[in-house]
Amino acid sequence: MNLFDIPAIDQHAHNLLKPEVAARSSYAAAFTEGYDPEIINLHARNTFFYRRSLREIAAFLNCEPQEEVILARRESLGLEQLTKLYLSAANLEAIYLDDGLQPDSILPLSWHEKFVPVKRILRLEVLAEKLIAEIDDFDTFVERFISEIDPPPFEVVGFKTIACYRCGLDIQPVSLAAAACSFYDFKQQLEHQLLRLADKHLIDFLLQQALLVAAKYQLPVQFHTGYGDPDLDLRLANPLYLRRLLELREYRHVPVVLLHASYPYTREAGYLASVYPQVYLDFGLAVPFLSVSGMRATLRQLLELTPTSKVMYSSDAHSIPELYYLGAKWGRQILAQVLEEAIRDSDLTVSEVDGIAAAILRENALSLYMKK
């Protein structure tokens, strides 16, 4: 089964780094969620993902599968030509970019639009941090926060929250008074530390304000779930913590997208999608970062229970253009393998799989995000 003729919607990815920033970064850093120098400079190069990727990249660039040779080849091509080649080979219909990752170090959405249609995913915590730096009064801050997202900016097709990173997914009700106290406490702390919003009361409060706006417009809200860099507590990244939120009537019409297959809580995510109408899933980051058998097992687990109308492709690509290509290649290959297994197992028929593949690669995302 060859799925490369189906143009994919990459429903969650990130901007590429500016060339001068990338020049200061280790190439191996793009192949790990770790950021300790020992992880990046030694251990990341000994993962299945890195070793497999080096061979894939070398074959694509027609050079030897050695990092220094690949780096020289990349330098000779230049970032624009390299990105054009990779995005063309990835056969992407559009990319939905979360531009809140390292916002001072990345190329703008307009740069990416030279190669592929782009829509924006607005990261809520980055917006909140920007406004906190500018505003001293809590009521004014809340008014500005809501006015920035209601109505959503024209280019925005969804919101994104990294509450999982900052305080975990056990989102609780927060009163206006409690949020105000947290706001003023946080403002005082800024005199002695860098601006990084990690106050649970304030994050939970702002997220629930944003969910009310998303309900008004039926705008999808992406939740980081499952593994990521060491900034998160993986124990609190289990999407089952979202059950209380999913049960609340006021958020019933907010499409909730659980990112990264919630790995390693994949079956838990699949269960939620199978019983809550508003819950959707993607499998970016798990694909292509895991081993081949790991990617296959993760997608199998998602589809054990999840309706195929709720699963979407993404790459979670960031920093370098190779990740868009590797995600698209392995996303299609692993999906094809799992669907072929489903035919052999009699879960699906041959006549059904083409439609299911197209739904997962593009149509589910188009249907979900284009309601705005």
Image (cartoon, rainbow, N blue to C red):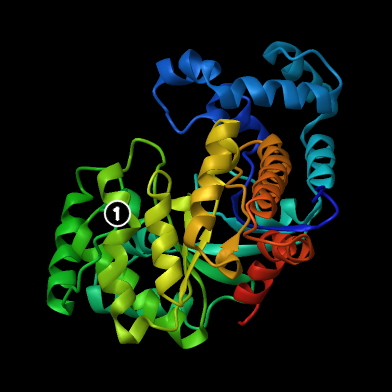
- Please name whichever residue, 149 or 281, is drawn nearer the observer in this view of the structure: 281
* Residue 203 picture location, percent across and down: 28, 63
Q: Residues within 10 Å of mark 1 (few under 14, many from 20)?
A: some
Tell me residue 224's x, y (percent).
Answer: 42, 54
Left or right placement of residue 155 versus residue 58 in this view: left
Name the residue: 50% across, 20% down: 44
Q: Is residue 20 left or right of residue 301?
A: right
Q: Nearer the viewer, residue 72 or 368?
A: 368
Q: Could you say whether the residue bearing mark 1 is in a helix, strand or loop?
A: loop
Q: Which residue is mark 1?
A: 197
Q: Position of residue 200 (x, y in %)?
A: 21, 59
Above or below 307: residue 294: above
Give the side of residue 328 with respect to residue 17, left or right: right
Q: What residue do we see at 19% from left, 43% from top? A: 192
Q: Residue at x 46, y 76 (%)?
A: 278
* Residue name at image x 57 percent, y 33 percent: 293
Quadrant of residue 235 in the image?
Answer: top left
The amino acid at mark 1 is Leu
Is residue 196 visible in the rendered image? The answer is no
Vertical side of 58 occupied by 167: above or below: below
Image coords of residue 368 (percent x, y) = 60, 74
Count all numbered tags in the image, as a single digit. 1
